[in-house]
Amino acid sequence: AQTVTQSQPEMSVQEAETVTLSCTYDTSESDYYLFWYKQPPSRQMILVIRQEAYKQQNATENRFSVNFQKAAKSFSLKISDSQLGDAAMYFCAYRSRETSGSRLTFGEGTQLTVNP
Amino acid sequence: ETGVTQTPRHLVMGMTNKKSLKCEQHLGHNAMYWYKQSAKKPLELMFVYSLEERVENNSVPSRFSPECPNSSHLFLHLHTLQPEDSALYLCASSQGTAPGNTIYFGEGSWLTVV
């Protein structure tokens, strides 16, 4: 079974600075998706960015980018020019492309605080 | 307005009560999900419906009973719950259940069992 580990329960960053959230995962598969979801105080989970494992190029969405290291099974999220609205719980998630009916497997989350 | 709407947002119920959580998606999707989010635990998938048929039941106790009358609505019927069932219940939807399809979540229903 796949597992997702987020080793940083809490992180903080100054407004306009850059922060990196860590995520590692364990799998024996080679074809899968990785996701970062954001959960603000409203509690709605919002997709931030996703990465397809067969793509070597790191995904980027505006101020959000990932560092995908497939061999190391590492998938970190970098937030540039942090804004107050970025404050939220961030979840890393894995989903297999090889297993029929695969499910999203989430990490335990990292609570990000943005200081003005 | 979010694409996935959940009601009620907060629910307090006794262990002998029967209540239901409702989810409605306005995205034209054909797959819907129930997730449970407990404190200090990863999100847990409970049920998956595709084209109104249950395709996954992740070893959920029978005191949780899902119902999907059409592709836009999903219910979670609750009866004789335990205090440890107190959690945030998230509904989600997607266009199909393929791994690459983005899953859209609602804002959740906070459940407290007393």
Image (cartoon, rainbow, N blue to C red):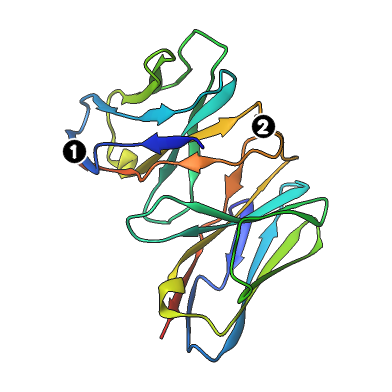
Q: Residues within 10 Å of mark 2 (few under 14, many from 20)?
A: few
All told, the count of numbered labels is 2
Is B88 left or right of B5, judged from the image as shown? left
Instruction: Kindly identify the residue that appears in the image at 72 percent across and 47 percent down.
Output: B27
Instruction: Kindly identify the residue that appears in the image at 50 percent across and 8 percent down.
Output: A56
The foreground one among B47 and A27 is A27
Is A101 left or right of B45, judged from the image as shown? right
Where is residue B25? Give x, y as percent.
69, 55
Residue closest to the far top = A56
| Image quarter of the N terminus of chain B | bottom right
Where is residue A17? Give x, y as percent.
20, 25
* Dot 1: chain letter: A
Three-letter code for the amino acid on which mark 1 is drawn: Ser
How far separated are the C-alphas under marks 2 and 1? 37 Å
Instruction: Kindly identify the residue that appears in the image at 75 percent across and 46 percent down.
Output: B29
Residue closest to the far bottom = B16
Q: Secondary structure at mark 1?
A: strand
Three-letter code for the amino acid on which mark 2 is drawn: Thr
Q: Which residue is mark 1?
A: A12
Figure check: A23 above or below A106: above
Figure check: B8 above or below A28: below
Q: Secondary structure at mark 2?
A: loop
N-terminal-most mark, 2 or 1: 1
Q: Which residue is mark 2?
A: A99
The foreground one among B73 and A96 is A96
Q: Quadrant of residue B66?
A: bottom right
Instruction: Kindly identify the residue that appears in the image at 56 percent across and 85 percent down.
Output: B80
Q: Residues within 10 Å of mark 1 (few under 14, many from 20)?
A: some
